[in-house]
Amino acid sequence: EGQINGIVTETFEIARADAGGVLAGPFAGVPSFIKDLIDWRGAPTLKGSRGLAGHMATADNVFAARWRRAGIVSLGKSATPEAGLISSTEPLSNGPTRNPWDISRIPGGSSGGAAALVAAGVVPFAHASDGGGSIRIPASSCGVFGLKPSRDRLPYSEPGATPPPLQISVNHAVTVSVRDSIELFRAAEMPGADYPPLGEIKPLTRRLKIGFAPEPIGGTALHPDTRAAIEDVAQLCRDLGHTVIDYTIPMDGPKFTDAFIMYWAAGAGEFAQAVSAASGKPVSPEILEPWTLGLANMAAARMADLPGIIGYLQAFEEEYHSFFNDLDILLTPVTGSPAVPVGEQAPDGDFDAVMDSVLKFVAYTSPMNVAGAASMSVPLAWSPTGLPIGAMFSGRRGDDALLFELALELETARPWAGRKPAVTAL
């Protein structure tokens, strides 16, 4: 762990006390980590921010409570960038988390600590969350499995909390096996009027029509290693009997990307105010990172545009689901390149240069957050230099079971559990 720096806070004494009690549930006694964006009773919640130093959780987050009920024992809090606001995990409060496949590279973000710890074999799975790709990007970068659930399938907001104009974030996990992801989903799900229980999942038997769309939605360039990898995965799907068609996503990618970044930036502004209130200090570089402040300033400069941006994003869900009028699944890369070098997306780097790197890297994942749709990164390819490259399969809102069925088939066809990174606890 010292080489990858994926742990923010160790809670071994709490874990021993929890393990010494009466544990029940499908994961009784299994160790894991909670991403340091949500509360786990008795542990600090720092959210990657120097401004929240000393904040101690007195109760479990609504999602964490489901994991505790399932018998999971948390060994600590995993690293995240400040407020989960970027696709690398290099918080100034804790230093960079490194990719176990190549410690000169990032593990992705914002669930970078979680994915690095799972990839290195420290734990079989770890809590992760996804507001714009933060499960799928680290899963792809670190060669593990990560499914972003549909909106409202698993708990996220605390009861009574004021909902945001558009709920883009979800909780779940990064795992080695598809089976563990399924069982964790089942342990935490909240079936209701919109969704029946997940139920038993078996490998897919029916053949699908898959739209293959390798080009980045924002018009940026695709790295040749990633292009070769995703073309190989498309061929794997053909070999399995699926119909794979070349597909151009019918959306205004630059307009969508601008709108999403502005909504994201508005969230950074709200976080800055919350940290200021919690710390009793003004919004400043003393308590917040330059990247967070830059996003907040971006939002402030265009605050008059925000109502229109929100309306556009709220309407996008219907547009997204129209992609599937003649498709079952959309196949794309997860990121525009394999994991980039540590420091390229450092939160104290030049703001415009970091933004340029982020937009090239986070080139596919955010539409599924806005649409509330199910989407997953499956570790099916590696670059010539040995870096993992995930393939992203996305469906409609509510297609979680279909994606899990496909994932089981892909895991059988091209197993990945036996591949070990350069830094491993196993």
Image: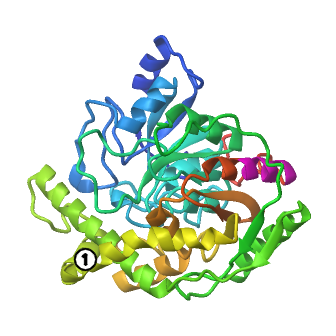
Residue 327, above or below 240: below
Q: Secondary structure at mark 1?
A: helix
Q: Is residue 5 visible?
A: no
Left or right: residue 99 compared with residue 74: right
User: Which quarter of the rendered picture does the C terminus lie within?
Assistant: top right
Where residue 409 sits: x, y (%)? 81, 50
What residue appears at the point 48 percent right and 13 percent down from the top-left corner? 20
What residue appears at the point 48 percent right and 80 percent down from the top-left corner? 359
Residue 220, above or below 88: below
What residue appears at the point 63 percent right and 76 percent down from the top-left corner? 337
Q: Nearer the viewer, residue 278 or 240?
A: 240
**Quadrant of res 376:** bottom right
Residue 113, above or below 357: above
User: Which quarter of the rendered picture does the N terminus lie within?
Assistant: top right
Tell me if mark 1 has few (under 14), some (14-19) or many (20+) residues whose alpha carbon lies within 10 angstroms of its own. Answer: some
Q: Nearer the viewer, residue 249 or 287?
A: 249
Q: Is residue 97 visible?
A: yes
Where residue 424 sits: x, y (%)? 67, 46
**Quadrant of res 227:** bottom right
What residue appears at the point 57 percent right and 72 percent down from the top-left corner? 322
Q: Amino acid at mark 1?
A: Leu
Secondary structure mainly formed by the magenta segment:
helix
The residue beneath circle 1 is 306
Residue 322, above or below 12: below
The number of callouts visible is 1
Q: Which residues are magenta?
A: 405-413
Q: Nearer the viewer, residue 54 or 68?
A: 68
Left or right: residue 31 compared with residue 283: right
Where residue 156 sits: x, y (%)? 39, 45
Where residue 345 sits: x, y (%)? 45, 73
Q: Magenta stretch: residue 364 in it? A: no
